[in-house]
Image: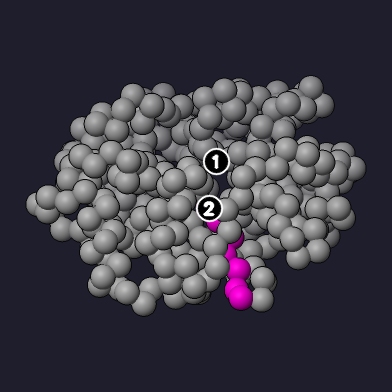
Amino acid sequence: MSKRAAAPGSGVRRTTGDGTLDDFFRSQNLQPFIQQPKQVVAFESSTSIKDAAVALDKHNILCAPVKDKAGDYLGLVDAVGLLYLVLDTFQEGEALDFGELLERYSESFADSDLSSLTGTPRFLPFVGLQCDDSTMLDVMLLLGQYNYHRVPLIRGKALVTLVSQSDVVRYLYQHREKFGDLLGATLQSLGLAGQAKLVTVCTAKNTAWDAFQLMKSKQVSAVGVVDAEGKLVNSISAREARYIMRQPPLLVALYSPVQEWLKMRGPDANKFSVVSAADTLGHVLDALVSKKLHRVYVVDAKGMPVRVVTLGDVISIFVSEEK
């Protein structure tokens, strides 16, 4: 039912569909996303890193396009990536809030604007699709098999909207009656329960700072938190770093145990979901949408994590790249 395909540049081998749904997705236009476009904030490449970080937080936006003076898009800047740049200057024991830390960063790197990030992991490629000529299949291949988190939809040179992995998973959920056979398949049968994608974990005794540094070094967007026996007890994602700007105590507490830090963040910080190899793809889809998650953890009979199934994994299982 499924096969393997490499996602260029991602380092991830996706489990992909068998192609039986490709014609359906090829027949679907992108009007659902065009008719309800998101608020999109775009920056000039001369915008300072400080101003970009503040603007992204103000508008509660995770990612924004960056364009040059001629209006051509250079890439996408990621809010979490900018936060990491600033947090790297923080030292344990400093009594600062994020605003003070950001100001210090700006003074130390006064010439750092967004153009200075070109070619770094903080600057994501701008791979746009002409919205009137592209199909749902095109979007799903980029978000699934090629592991882009967002795809810009453009008309000519004008940006219309950004489509995220979450957007497409919600679309799949809304049309779930069309995918009955596939959604009834187990994760085991689809190849989504093995260790092709090992789980990155930290222990409950590690600090929140350790967890964020682990995400950076492993180039993952979340790590599982396990107890002394290796059982999954929580999860912390890169997105949690955004709250450091909004909740000043979280910055000083970065060197506290990760479980304590997550409790300070608030009750919604503890949202994570576990499934078994015997659970169906439909069950996973429902969990991702109803709980607004970006991943679920596959655990064994002892509660130990053996695999992460992400939004991109789910999208990829529905489609197969054309030969």
Q: Is residue 98 left or right of residue 313?
A: left
Could you say which is closer to the camera, residue 23 or residue 155? 155
Q: Secondary structure at mark 1?
A: strand
- Residue 154 in the image: state x and y as whole percent: 75, 57
Residue at position x 61%, y 55% in the image: 148
What separation in Å lies between label 1 and label 2 (alpha carbons)?
19 Å
Image position of 193 (left or right of 117): right
Left or right relative to 96: residue 229 = right
Q: Is residue 223 magenta?
A: no
Please give the residue where the numbered disc 2 appears in the rendered image: 63
First in sequence, mark 1 or 2: give its number: 2
Nearest to viewer (mark 1 / mark 2): 2
Q: Report whether residue 282 is seen.
A: yes
Q: Quadrant of residue 109?
A: bottom left
Q: Which residue is mark 1?
A: 310
Bin the neighbour count of mark 1 within 10 Å (Cα to Cα): few under 14, some 14-19, many 20 and up. Answer: some
Specify whether residue 145 is in view: no
Q: Which residues are magenta?
A: 63-69
> What type is the residue that disc 1 sits on?
Thr
Number of numbered discs visible in the structure rendering? 2
Image height check: is 173 above or below 205?
above
Q: What is the x, y in percent for residue 244? A: 30, 44
Is residue 68 rendered magenta in the image?
yes
* Secondary structure of the residue carrying numbered label 2: strand
Q: Amino acid at mark 2?
A: Cys
Q: Is residue 235 above or below residue 127?
A: above
**For the N terminus, which image quadrant?**
top right
Q: Would you call the spot at circle 2 few (<14 residues within 10 Å), some (14-19), or many (20 or more)?
A: many
